[in-house]
Each structure stands twice: as structure tokens, then as C-alpha cells.
Image (spheres, helix red, strand yellow):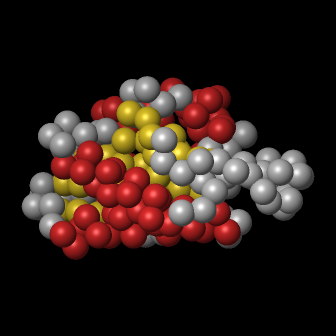
Amino acid sequence: MLAPSLPTSSAEGRHGETGRVARHLLVVHHSRTGTTALLRDDVLAGITDAGGDVDVRSRRAFDAGPDDVTWADALVLCTPANFGYMSGALKDFFERVYHPCLEQTAGLPYALVVKGDTDVDGAVASVERIVNGLRWRAIAPPVAVVGALTDDARAAARELGATVAAALDAGII
């Protein structure tokens, strides 16, 4: 798919195991009109740009589940802002993974991309409330895109993907 997984680290993993630690990055996304999908594509391109030994799963929010989350060493969440909230699909994802992942994924690094026509503050806040309950930790400020999709917004999403992948590959997160 994107970058092959060649785990080589001997550091202690997120779950306390030692030995070879796989570097797994999960991208969970939803897009109704296609603009958030373009930002997701930019995140994935940035992950590829970073190179390294990162195995990537890109899952639609309706298709991602607890097994994907527990597989991941970090996540990127991509959602449109709908009526001042995250997409219903991302909310559905959180409802399905919350209790099964609550104890297993504390400290899981995540990043967020939100696209809205007029405002994204409510969508960002709604995601942050849930990930705070899960005890996940933000590793970058959200890429928040309001209005038309610009080259700068797309570059920011690409940079976010590259940053998360590089940090994950280097063992920083």
C-alpha cells in the first residue's frame, strides 16, 4: 500500500512490550462532498513523503473499529464539520471504539484535520471532548480549514501527515 512495515526498534512499545515494535499509523476519515477526502489524500501523500518504516491503514470512519485502533501506534482523524459538530460517521466510529479501547489506548497520539464551510470550532471541540475521555494525546494543532480548499490548506494537511509519520518512525511518539 503506502510504506511497507519493517519494524526495527528495540525500544519499549506503547503497551509496555519490548523488542521489535511495529510502527502503525491509522487514518480514519469521512467525506460527504469530497473536500475532506482531498485533505485525507494530502495527509496520506505526506506520510509517503516522510518515508521510513510506517505501515498505514486508511479506513472510512464507518469501517474502522476497535481492532484498527488497538493496532495503531498513532492516528490521524479527518472529518468535515457538520452543523457545528464532527461528522456523524466519525461520531459513530467513536461510539463503537470508546469502551473497547478505553483502557488499552490511553496515551495514544492523534492528529486532527477538520474541513468546514463557515466554522470548524464546534467540530474540533467535539472531537477533543471525546479524545480527552479516551485519554489520547494531541501531537499537533488541528489542521482546521474554513471555506474554500486552498493550496495552503492542502499543504498543511500534507505536512501534518509527514510530521506524524516521521515522528512515529523516529520513535518520538
**Looking at the image, can residue 149 be seen?**
yes
Residue located 36% across and 64% down the image:
158
Q: Can you give x and y, in whole percent of width and height, for residue 59 in the image?
A: 43, 35
Up the image or down, 173 lies above or below 29; here it is below
Q: Can you give x and y, in whole percent of width and height, for residue 14 in the image?
A: 76, 53
Residue located 15% across and 40% down the image:
33
Residue located 50% across and 66% down the image:
50
Quadrant assignment, res 104: top right
Quadrant assignment, res 149: bottom left
**Looking at the image, can residue 123 be seen?**
no
Left or right: 147 as drawn, with respect to 7: left
- In-front residue for pair 98/72: 72
**Quadrant of the frame with the C terminus:** bottom right
Q: Can you give x and y, in whole percent of width and height, for residue 83 in the image?
A: 19, 44
Residue with the most extreme right position = 18
Residue located 59% across and 48% down the image:
4
- In-front residue for pair 109/136: 109
Left or right: 32 as drawn, with respect to 155: left
Quadrant assignment, res 171: bottom right
- In-front residue for pair 137/155: 155
Tell me how many marks there are. Answer: 0
Q: Can you give x and y, in whole percent of width and height, for residue 70 in the image?
A: 66, 37
Left or right: 59 as drawn, with respect to 9: left
- In-front residue for pair 152/129: 152
